[in-house]
Amino acid sequence: MLDMKKLPLALTVVGLGAAASFAEIKINDNFSTSGFVDMSALGMAPDSGDASLGASLDQYEMDFMYKFGFFSARADINSGSGGANTIFTEQAYITAALTTELSLGMGRFLSTSGFEAAEPTGLYQYSVSKLLSGYLGGTYGGYQNGVNIAYATPKFGVYGAIVTDIWAGAAETELLKSPGFELQLSVMPVEGVTAKVTGLFQMYDEDANAAKDNGQDEINAWASYAKGKITAAAEFSYFLNWASANPVQKNDATGMGWLAMFNYKITDKLAATVRYSAVTLDDEISASDDMDSEITLSPSFAVSPNWLALAEVRMELDGTDAQKGVAYAVESTFSF
């Protein structure tokens, strides 16, 4: 497990980049690595249309961590993500620990918004929620180019970032005409309880995007309880000036998204998760129903400290006819 005591407090409480939930291999005092291999088989039995079943190497990732005094750097290299035979840099950033509580970062890093992790090693089930996979697309901020600053104590944290684009991620490099802003407040009042509120504000260059309003915004809030055998979380997002399918609208639709998740550790090796999530957009002309929702059941088994296997049944409750039905999966994740 990653030794959180060796990281600046601002990084561990607020969280810069993807949270590591796997072992770390120490090469020397300044250099360490970690990573994982994620494989799965995924099937779908839609209410209409043909059933499908596939298997793939979903992701192979190697992470490299460097530390030199008050400065540290991290680079994550991915291969095979989504079944594509490509190698790419997922994130790479430098962090300066100005004090024990205050840190400054720059580069390409993951947004701090949202409860669910970006990597399979941080998820409690195979799939991500409708806040990341619904008809609105990914509503969490993605991997971003920019700068960030974090201040954190064991019970309170503040995080801010200026990035080239909240949702387009590394595909966007223009900053002056279309900057994105992220602000997060975190509280950890008692052991096992965490609550975070994040504001995401993305401006658009109207000259280059005549079909868009001045920007797209989101308020995301979640709280979790993790103690003993129980982990529970609730999340709510409010969408402002969101992209709409209505041809007479610009980015002036509003909507909501929410999540409820409960995980129970039955034994040291066996656990079970249930999750409900949904998104909806105030859009009178849409290719989808007003609501896009699902409920997921997922048992998991820790084969070893580094190897997790799980199964999942996900019931698509709303959405288009092609989306409605039952999806099922088995997954194997080996971390190192």
Image (spheres, rainbow, N blue to C red):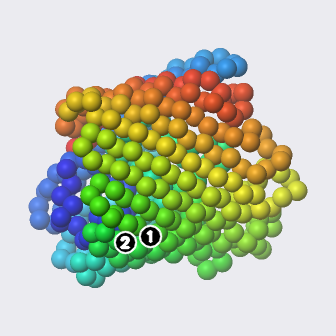
Tag 1 residue: 185
Judge from the rendering whether residue 71 lies leftward or rightward of residue 290; answer left or right.
Answer: left
Front in this rendered view, residue 55 or 278? 278
Q: Position of residue 251 (x, y in %)?
A: 76, 61
- C-alpha gap between disc 2 and disc 1: 6 Å
Tag 2 residue: 157
Q: Position of residue 72 (x, y in %)?
A: 26, 71
Q: Which amino acid type is marked by label 2?
A: Gly
The residue lying at 55 percent from left, 41 percent from top is 277
Badge 1 marks a residue whose secondary structure is: strand
Above or below — where is 213 with respect to 114? below
The residue lying at 78 percent from left, 40 percent from top is 287
Badge 2 marks a residue whose secondary structure is: strand
Name the quadrant containing residue 171: bottom right
The residue lying at 18 percent from left, 77 percent from top is 69
Above or below — where is 150 with respect to 228? below
**Mark 2 or mark 1: whose residue is earlier in sequence:** 2
Q: Position of residue 120 (x, y in %)?
A: 38, 42
Q: Verify CB contact (< 8 Å) between mark 2 and mark 1.
A: yes
Residue at the extreme bottom: 98
Residue at the extreme top: 50
Q: Which amino acid type is marked by label 1?
A: Leu
